[in-house]
Image (spheres, rainbow, N blue to C red):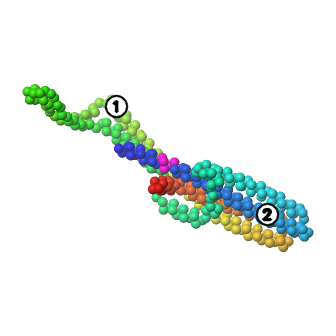
Amino acid sequence: NKMARYTSDLAHEKVKMKEADVLATVDEAYWRVISVQEKVRLAQTYKSLLDHLVQDLENVYAEGMTTRNEVLKVQVKQNEAELTLVKAQNGLQLSKMLLGQIIGLEAEQIELDSEIISEEQLSSRFLALESSNAERAEIVMLRSKLALTESARRMVKSQFLPNVFLTAGYNWVEPNVYKGSQNNLGGDWMVGIGVQVPILTWGDRIHQVHIADQEVAKAELELQDAQEMITLQVQQNRFKHAEALKKMELTKLSKEQAEENLRITKNNLLEGMNNVRDILEAQTMWEKAASEDIDARVEAAVTLSELEKTTGALYQYATEHTKAQEEK
């Protein structure tokens, strides 16, 4: 009965582990959509900046305050930005198709929140992770496997123990020999007890016990090795997430600085203190800083998801989802 229960636990943990793998796959595809979606918004904003710049320069050119060559330089950048936007939109459609294929929806049905994850959301998830007491399904499975091998070893060792058995029965006979062979049913009962003691096994059972001991030792080493590897993975992913948070902090600052630089450069251009090259460089710097800020935010969310998986919190989410479905 114990061995059957351990086997059942193993099967349940396999299901939980598979559910967690599906969650991780969906999470990865989700953040890919978010990333590309934000890149589309960025490309649209960048193109809008160039559109306004072209319009301003054409007005200045009409007044004879700049050359046609300066206007053409910006128009080339405008065309490049339009191509970048088309590529980003195609990438968004493909990433939605991939996510839809995983979760069973059409790409057109997928509408995600346009606001990328914030520091507050990351912080709340991280605090929930710190207070979680979830455990990796792999560890639970290895513990069940160890208990299973220990039970199997006890089963093998039981072959060396005496087997005691009790028998009882009742017999009917006609004619009744107990009453002078009368023509009716007669009967008696009997009770017996027996003991079987293994004496000579030719070493067969000793080998079986040795094999069972080796299986238990193997299961113990597998459990110990898995615990050490998971500890290493958790620490590694903690470092990765901490680095991602620091990167997100720095890219946010760089984006703010690039926005201020772009504002000042644009004002100086209108006052004749800067040329077109300066404004194009400022816009390129802003576009790069904004793109890096998106990448840093997505990286912070992805590394947190990886940390949740290595600590076992993701398996807890799968369990909670299963319970919710069962309640429905």
Q: Which residues are magenta?
A: 14-18
- Which percent across, then down, holds residue 19? 51, 50
As drawn, 65 above or below 230 = below
Count the marks.
Answer: 2
Q: Where, by quadrant of the figure, is residue 290 drawn?
A: bottom right
- Which percent across, then down, holds residue 44? 73, 61
Residue visible at 77% across and 55% down in the picture: 83
- Which percent across, then down, holds residue 85? 74, 57
Mark 2 or mark 1, earlier in chain: 2
Q: Which quadrant of the rendered structure holds the N terminus?
A: top left
Query: Mostly what secondary structure, the magenta segment?
Result: helix
Left or right placement of residue 48 versus residue 123 in this view: right
Which residue ends up furthest to the bottom in the rendered image? 271
Q: Amino acid at mark 1?
A: Gly
Which residue ends up furthest to the front in the rendered image? 183
Whole-angstrom CA distance, mark 2 to mark 1, is: 88 Å
Disc 1 is placed on an element classified as loop
- Which percent across, then down, holds residue 246? 62, 63
Q: Amino acid at mark 2?
A: Leu
Can residue 319 be seen at all in this image of the molecule?
Answer: no
Residue visible at 81% across and 71% down in the picture: 268
Q: Which numbered tag is attached to residue 50? A: 2
Left or right placement of residue 182 versus residue 195 in this view: left
* Residue identifier under label 1: 203
Which residue ends up furthest to the right in the rendered image? 64
Residue visible at 77% across and 61% down in the picture: 47
* Circle 2 residues within 10 Å: few <14, some 14–19, many ≥20: many
